[in-house]
Amino acid sequence: MWLRVLIAGIIGGIVVFFVSFLTHGMLHLQSRTLANISDSPSFIEHVQSRGLKPGFYIFPDMPSSEEQNDAAKMAEASKRFESGPAGLLLIASTGIPSMGEMLGKEFATNVLAALLAAWIVSLAGADIGFGRRWLAVVAMGLFAWLSISASYGIWYWFPHNFTHDEFLCTFLEWSVAGLAIAAIARRPPIVATTLVDKG
């Protein structure tokens, strides 16, 4: 059974990787929601002048944990957010990793995710049919989207178009990979044996 899980995980990961290439590289889901900043050189110069280290920043400033109990401070922060602009700023480390490195890491995470999905599917009884095994894999993908991407849209204001595209990518990738995983990571049928009384 473990060999089935291993094969299903590897094949499922390969499928996710190539469907992801289709959704991101050819259909341009998610990347189409990213907009360039006008006059980016002057913006970059301003960021450099602030001396911001690589990290995740929010603006305007959020009240500290101590200030969150102060009604006046919270009201002031609310007004700043209402007047805008407000947002998040991600400062990445300088230097872009090689395409080979990024693709390698992406492939590895795809295979690991597919291995987990295959293992979970393998726990189903032999009487669970292909359709329900496939639905289980799709449900795992949607669970990941709901627990991570949807929360980012709620708490970190990720644009609706971005989270919507993320949903489409997740659904397509795991719907197709689920076909392979459901077909391979299945328990063999139980063969009934008859005991013969030799007495």
Image (tube, rainbow, N blue to C red):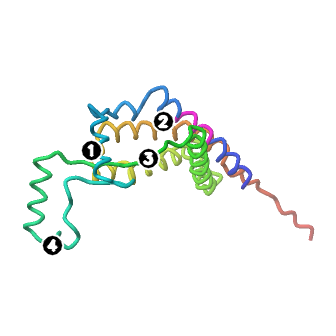
Quadrant in which the N terminus appears:
bottom right
Q: Amino acid at mark 1?
A: His
Closer to the observer: label 4 or label 1? Answer: 1
CA gap, disc 1 to disc 3? 40 Å
Closer to the observer: label 2 or label 1? Answer: 1
Give how far across and how far down residue 138 sits, in percent: 49, 44
**Residue 195 counted in the magenta span:** no
Q: Amino acid at mark 4?
A: Asn
Closer to the observer: label 4 or label 3? Answer: 4
| Horizontal side of residue 70 vs 147, given as left or right | left
**Which label's residue is closer to the chain start, 2 or 4?**
4
* Mark 1 Cα-neighbour bin, 10 Å: few <14, some 14–19, many ≥20: few
Closer to the observer: label 2 or label 4? Answer: 4
Observer-nearest of 132 and 178: 178
| Horizontal side of residue 66 vs 133, given as left or right | left
Q: Residue at x 20, y 73 (%)?
A: 66
CA gap, disc 4 to disc 3? 36 Å
Q: Amino acid at mark 2?
A: Leu
Observer-nearest of 91 and 166: 91
Q: Residue at x 48, y 26 (%)?
A: 26
What residue is pinned by disc 1?
A: 46
Closer to the observer: label 1 or label 3? Answer: 1
Residue 172: give its label.
Answer: 2
Q: Amino acid at mark 3?
A: Leu
Residue at the farthest right position:
198
Observer-nearest of 96 and 199: 96
**Which label's residue is closer to the chain start, 4 or 1?**
1
Residue 158 lies, with reference to residue 195, above or below; the image says above
**Which label's residue is closer to the chain start, 4 or 3?**
4
Give how far across and how far down residue 143 sits, in percent: 43, 51
Residue 69: give its label.
Answer: 4
What residue is pinned by disc 3?
A: 142
